[in-house]
Amino acid sequence: DSPRRSLVVSMSSERKSDEFWNQPRFPPKKPLITKGRLKKAQLLEFFNKCQNMLLSADSGLLLRQARKEGRDINKIVIKWQHEMFEHLGIHRDFGVESLKSIKINFPSDQSMPGLLMRFAKICQCSVMKAMMPYARAGDRPRRFPAKKKLIDSGAIMPKHAILQFFHRCAEMLRTPETATLLREAHNRGEDLQTLSIRWQREIIENLGYEQEFGVNSMMLIPLYYGQDRRLMMEMQLFQQVCGRVVKQAMAPTLTADLDVSKRRFKPQKGKLLSKGPLPKKMYMKYFKAVIKCLNSDKSVQLLKEAKARGEDIGLKSVQWQREIFESIGIEQEFGVESLNRLAVDYPRDKELQAEMLKFAKACAAVVNGL
């Protein structure tokens, strides 16, 4: 990556010339191999160097700039792959043909087709990463400090570290402090998704992993841990809480009123439950309380009056449900996340899943019935 490093580091937001994009990022090595059969070691070197190059911070910077200029970043990624072949002393056409012939050239080595598939997915990840909102930890004062020594090598973060990241981020995003910071940022016109990503990157380094390596690890989870059903579900839950918290900061009416005096159901005094798997008895208590609330004559009357005023009765129902969480001692954001986690934390509890279904039907029935 070093031949163009000075150019990458000095890039500004100004549009670059065609000459900039057409010049080689990786100089060719001569002479170039044009025939025969590449050895497994040569292909592995190509895969490894391409993976490190495509997922590097420098490549991300270049691809985001190219996308901003309206250039075809897929073509740029392919161009870099061709250059990498020749940087390793392999003619680009011969290298591409060798990739196409992997099954023929290595008929008894079942690992090679898998490595080729992994390489193709990593190429896709590099493009997807360039299209995502971007923020870098350290560009602004940190909310979460980085460890002094950061791990930045290996294929991917270990599973336990990824799970720790998901849980730490979820806890951080649910806090009142985060809600306040996001609302303030929204009022200033800042992009909340970018702000959330910066905090997530800070947490990666707070856990001891270099942020770019950590982000790459998150993108490669389906590739390395795709068969791990629990981890994949944890990833989906993490994505849901990220989206939900940002959405709520932009539309505070989705949450229970911060002014508790205006709530129908007042919060329980003392510290609210906000960590760990929600106990089964608390799920059951919550479902019973919500169903009782929604089926009451008072709720039906209040919803009819709200509908007559042109209010969103579905939203009002959700606000009551969130208020009920805190009225029985469960922090509302943690409660909502726990509903999404029920199948993960209690995968074999048929009774609890049946009560969850009754709860969902009651929520739908009271709104649809009006």
Image (spheres, helix red, strand yellow):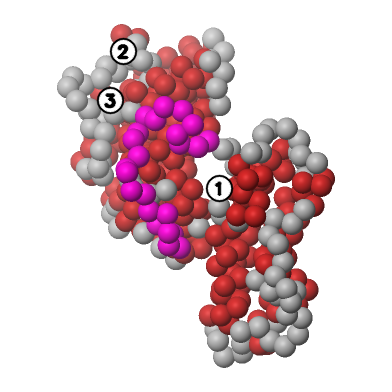
- Is 144 magenta? The answer is yes
Q: Secondary structure at mark 3?
A: helix
State which tag comes first along the sequence, 1 or 2. Answer: 1
Place of residue 144 in the rendered image (x, y in percent of width and height, measured from the top left):
35, 34
Magenta-highlighted residues? 135-157
Q: Residue at horizontal 78%, vertical 73%?
A: 93
State which tag comes first along the sequence, 1 or 3. Answer: 1
Q: Which mark is residue 57?
A: 1
Q: Residues within 10 Å of mark 3 (few under 14, many from 20)?
A: many
Taking the image as drawn, is residue 369 in sight? no
Q: Amino acid at mark 1?
A: Ala
Taking the image as drawn, is residue 280 in sight? yes
Identify the main secondary structure in magenta.
loop
Q: Residues within 10 Å of mark 1 (few under 14, many from 20)?
A: some
Vertical placement of residue 359 versus 37, above or below: above
Q: Which mark is residue 260?
A: 2
Place of residue 13 in the rendered image (x, y in percent of width and height, measured from the top left):
68, 33
Vertical placement of residue 259 versus 165, above or below: above
Q: Circle 3 is placed at which residue position?
A: 326
Q: Residue furthest left?
A: 270
Q: Alpha carbon of mark 1 to alpha carbon of mark 3: how far? A: 43 Å
Q: Residue at horizontal 51%, vertical 63%?
A: 223
Q: Alpha carbon of mark 2 to alpha carbon of mark 3: how far? A: 10 Å
Q: Secondary structure at mark 2?
A: helix
- Is 32 magenta? The answer is no
Q: Amino acid at mark 2?
A: Val
Q: Residue at horizontal 57%, vertical 13%?
A: 310
